[in-house]
Amino acid sequence: MSTDFALWVFLAHSPLLWLTVTLVAYVVADRISLASNRHPLANPVLHAVWMIGLVLYATRTPYPVYFEGAQFVHFLLGPATVALAIPLYEHRATVLRVLLPMLAALAVGSIVAVVSALVTARLLGVPHDMLVTLAPKSVTASVAMGISGALGGDPALTAVLVILTGIIGAVLVTPLFDRLGLTDWRARGFAAGLAAHGIGTARAFQVSEVAGTFAGIAMGLNALLTAVIVPVALGLLR
């Protein structure tokens, strides 16, 4: 007991506390997901978010204080994204065989993701600065926040929208594709990465390495294409 108390005292006065909280919440959520046979509603990110949020609310901890410790996990997003090149290399022959259909799906998916969100928001009377914040919701958080900030949006709110988009996509992707009868792991993975970025990619890797590989490709290419599409689409809406 004295050892546990000493560990708590150390963590409570260190940014490592919130790093520990983040990792423990995700491990618990992942164990739940595994116990449910990876049911879509048991998505680890979804449940880790509310667990951490509950701890922050109960302890009255401001977000900047939390992020001071959790930023170590945030830093690892970059290396994790680069590491997606490993399965891409291992499945390069499969990728090359479907390169043209994949690029066509990328173009359609990227344009629809941006235009549908902007047009719907515009019809609902959303102001222009919020349109900028909303537009890059389907790309990975670091890229989306950069696009939003450069064009005059709110990067913090963009990050929230990106996470919501990813969680919703990761939850819906499996039952939706099952209902549609889509069994090709390449197509399923590519659609998940295109619509739900990193969270969708993580979900794709849970069910199939091939699906995860194509999800990673879609996530990377969509980030690049969306950075070009968003300024053009916003200019047309003006």
Image (cartoon, rainbow, N blue to C red):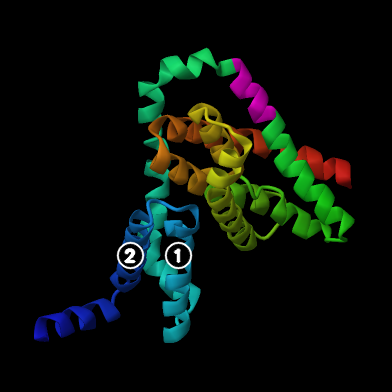
The N terminus - image quarter: bottom left
Magenta stretch holds residue 81: no
Q: Residue at x 63, y 37 (%)?
A: 180
Q: Foreground residue, 205 or 238? A: 205
Q: Are marks 2 and 1 in contact (CB under 8 Å)?
A: yes
Query: Is residue 36 toward the left or the right of residue 163 in the image?
Result: left
- What x and y, as percent, mark residue 197? 54, 44
Residue 209, quarter of picture: top left
Q: Residues in magenta?
A: 100-107
Looking at the image, the residue that sits furthest to the left is 2
Query: Is residue 113 toward the left or the right of residue 179 in the image?
Result: right
Q: Residue at x 66, y 39 (%)?
A: 227
Q: SS at mark 2? A: helix
Q: Residue at x 81, y 55 (%)?
A: 121
- What x and y, as percent, mark residue 135? 71, 49
Give the numbered dot on residue 66. Answer: none
Whichever of callouts 2 and 1 sits on the residue coming sooner in the sequence is: 2
**Cα distance, mark 2 to mark 1?**
9 Å
- What x and y, as percent, mark residue 71? 40, 61
Amino acid carrying mark 1 in the image: His
Magenta stretch holds residue 105: yes
Label 1 crowd bin: few (<14), some (14–19), many (20+), radius 10 Å: many
Q: SS at mark 1? A: helix
Amino acid carrying mark 2 in the image: Val
Vertical relation: 23 (above or below) 105:
below
Vertical relation: 145 (above or below) 60:
above
Mark 2 = which residue?
28
Please identify the dominant SS of the magenta region.
Answer: helix
Mark 1 = which residue?
47
Query: Is residue 90 toward the left or the right of residue 56 in the image?
Result: left
Vertical relation: 158 (above or below) 63:
above
